[in-house]
Image (spheres, rainbow, N blue to C red):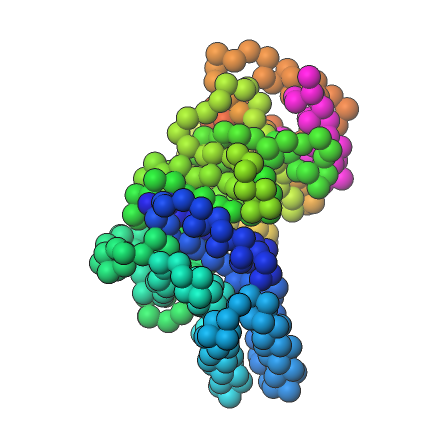
Amino acid sequence: MHVWKFGGTSVGKPERMHSIRTLITSDDTRKIVVLSALSGTTNALLAIGESLKANNDADANTKINTLKAHYDEFLGELYKTAEGKSAGQQIVDSEFSFIRSLTSIKPFTLKQEKELVAEGELLSTQIFQAYLAEEGVRSALLPALEFMRIDADNEPEIQYTEEKLAEMLPLHSDKQIIVTQGFICRNPRGEVDNLKRGGSDYTASLIGGAIRAEEIQIWTDIDGMHNNDPRIVKNTFPVRELTFDEAAELAYFGAKILHPSTITPARMFGVPVRLKNTMDPTAPGTLIADRTSSEVFKAIAAKDGITALYIHSTRMLNAYGFLRRIFEIFEKYKTPVDMLATSEVSVSVTIDNTERLQEITDELNTFCTLEEPDHDQTIICIVGNFSADNEGVAVRVFNAMKNIPIRMISYGGTESNLSLLVHGRYKAEALNALNDGLFSA
């Protein structure tokens, strides 16, 4: 069984839903199809929520009317028959009736906001399932709120998902296509909630891991993961194969096509992930699995908004426990560290969340000396096959970067990542220089 996920742009127009139906029924493979909300819907729902939080019901109702008009028009172009349009209209009328009911709840709390935002996925999946039924596809809708749950730490309970799907899927053994929602779930109190990180991609990976799928496919409007940021660098190209570790590094350090959380369940259960392009279905895309190709340099990604901290203490010399004390402070304030560099008496770290920076620096100052933090930094992550047997890796990177100031270097922590810290003003120059130096013939 496969798990295929389609994002908002892939389902954002009626003709694209038509294309998805053709894609998912092009062979006899059974599939769980995970859908995001129609493009623009989540933002529109959040805007409605902001009006309700401000007690501006008139503005909220105006926004609701505008969004419903968009869906009414969508239905007219999606369905071919009167029966199909009637089924679709009943779905839209019902869900928008619920949305309107939220305007009467005072105060409008986070609980209601999560219920409101979930409507995007509830609408898209029901509309699509009604369309599949109109087309005579053997399909069923499996509500994610019945099998997807997070714990008190907002982490998905994959064992719960395994158990529920093991009960629910056999009830639809005669169906080729199972449609479900991405992003949404329930929390320990049974309330509607969401996965936040990775959204629908994460849902697809969790389902794929839970059912031990043959493959997870993430369909977007890009032909796989590129070797560099195509918005900044010309002459980029799709990377055909990546390991789980390589893909996770790229996703964490800025490759927008995939969220880093997506990789974890797939890697845990050894389920390959394939990134595909709905606009060009015949393109091979990118395969993420245990195996890898032989190229030394695979891809580059960049993560902005980084702050660097420089910590000094002569008491670190020949001492133990010093690093532990530093990292206990970051743990206390729930602030992850991205990069780390050490010398005999200094430690440099980078963070991307400065919400608790003042508390962190106040505690560090009790036993260390800190330089002024460097803000607006960028981490450039270079991913590839950097085993100890590969010669000249660092030389090629530094030759490419010879005209660009480098503030920190992280190399050797894994065999798949070399990271550089530069000021954000050098990001575009660095990405282009590395592209020329590492990938040009």
Q: Residue at point 56% right, 36% down? A: 283
Q: Position of residue 349 (x, y in %)?
A: 56, 38
Image quarter (top left, top right, bottom left or bottom right) of the N terminus:
top left
The number of callouts visible is 0
Q: Position of residue 135 (x, y in %)?
A: 44, 62
Q: Nearer the viewer, residue 290 or 284?
A: 284
Residue 310 in which image quadrant = top right
Relative to residue 118, is residue 207 depicted above or below?
above
Q: Is 433 left, or right, of 128 in this rendering?
A: right
Q: Position of residue 195 (x, y in %)?
A: 44, 58
Relative to residue 378, is residue 401 depicted above or below?
above
Relative to residue 334, is residue 48 depicted above or below?
below
* Residue 216 located within the stretch drawn in magenta: no
Q: Is 222 left, or right, of 196 in this rendering?
A: right
Image quarter (top left, top right, bottom left or bottom right) of the C terminus:
top right
Q: Nearer the viewer, residue 204 or 428?
A: 204
Q: Which residues are magenta?
A: 418-441
Q: Position of residue 124 (x, y in %)?
A: 49, 65
Q: Nearer the viewer, residue 172 or 55?
A: 172
Q: Is 174 left, or right, of 250 in this rendering?
A: left
Magenta segment's dominant SS is: helix
Residue 379 visible to the viewer: no
Q: Residue at point 39% right, 29% down? A: 290
